[in-house]
Image (cartoon, rainbow, N blue to C red):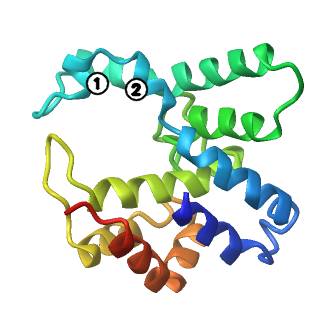
Amino acid sequence: QEYVRILARGLQHHPRFSHFLNERSIDLLAKSAPLHDIGKVGIPDHILLKPGKHTPDEWEIMKTHAILGSQAIEQAERDAAKSVAFLTMAKDIAHYHHERWDGSGYPDGRRGDDIPIAARLMALADVFDALITRRVYKPPMPLAVAQGIIIDERGKHFDPDVVDCFSAQFDQFKDIAERYRDD
């Protein structure tokens, strides 16, 4: 949530992002970010919690979490008594946060600016967090190594301008990582 907020604030006045990133959308983005992986509740535990590498079939099942998440949020929107603005953004984030700038992501193979801005910000924040956090299948990575991986994926996995913002704001990313580090 805080990584996404930092990226959004850093890009708020950038010509490619200023039409979208105003105070309201940044607030909605921060509220929406925690729902990005809500679709993982639909993934069987034996796949989700597997300590080793997934088989190709398991990986295909794991990738469905993006669509499952957007469908769940869409259902929540239909069930709500009134419109809940952050759910619309959360639905886009859940659906598109695994798309890649070069088009090699999933579930739709979107590329470049066809990926919603909120999902592009979430993509970088999510990967950074995944790299530096302990998982059942890996230990946490040092911050500097994670930083290098993100920078190396500029123009491939990530929007180049979002990576440039990440680089410029890296001290804030480090502060957040230290503040919320699991001991």
Residue 78: percent from the left, percent from the top?
A: 79, 15
Crowd band around label 2 with a 10 angstrom C-alpha radius: few (<14), some (14–19), many (20+) = some
Location of residue 14 with respect to 38 vertically, above or below: below
Residue at 40% x, 26% y is 63
Res 108 → quadrant: top right
Q: Amino acid at mark 2?
A: Lys
- Identify the residue at horizontal 29%, vertical 15% (top origin): 44
Q: Is residue 156 visible?
A: no
Query: Neighbour class for label 1 at 10 Å: few (<14), some, many (≥20)?
Result: few
- Position of residue 71 in the picture relative to residue 78 (left or right): left
Instruction: Give how far apart the Cα atoms at labels 2 and 1 are.
Output: 6 Å
Above or below — where is 104 with respect to 123? above
Q: Which mark is residue 59?
A: 1
Residues at discs 2 and 1 in contact (Cβ within 8 Å):
yes
- Quarter placement of the N terminus: bottom right
Residue found at the very far left of the displayed protein: 52
Query: Which SS class for mark 1?
Result: helix
> In the rendered image of this protein, does residue 65 appear above or below residue 105?
above
- The residue identified by callout 2 is 63
Q: Position of residue 133 (x, y in %)?
A: 27, 57
Specify the amino acid type for callout 1. Trp
Indicate left or right for 38 with 17 as reference: left
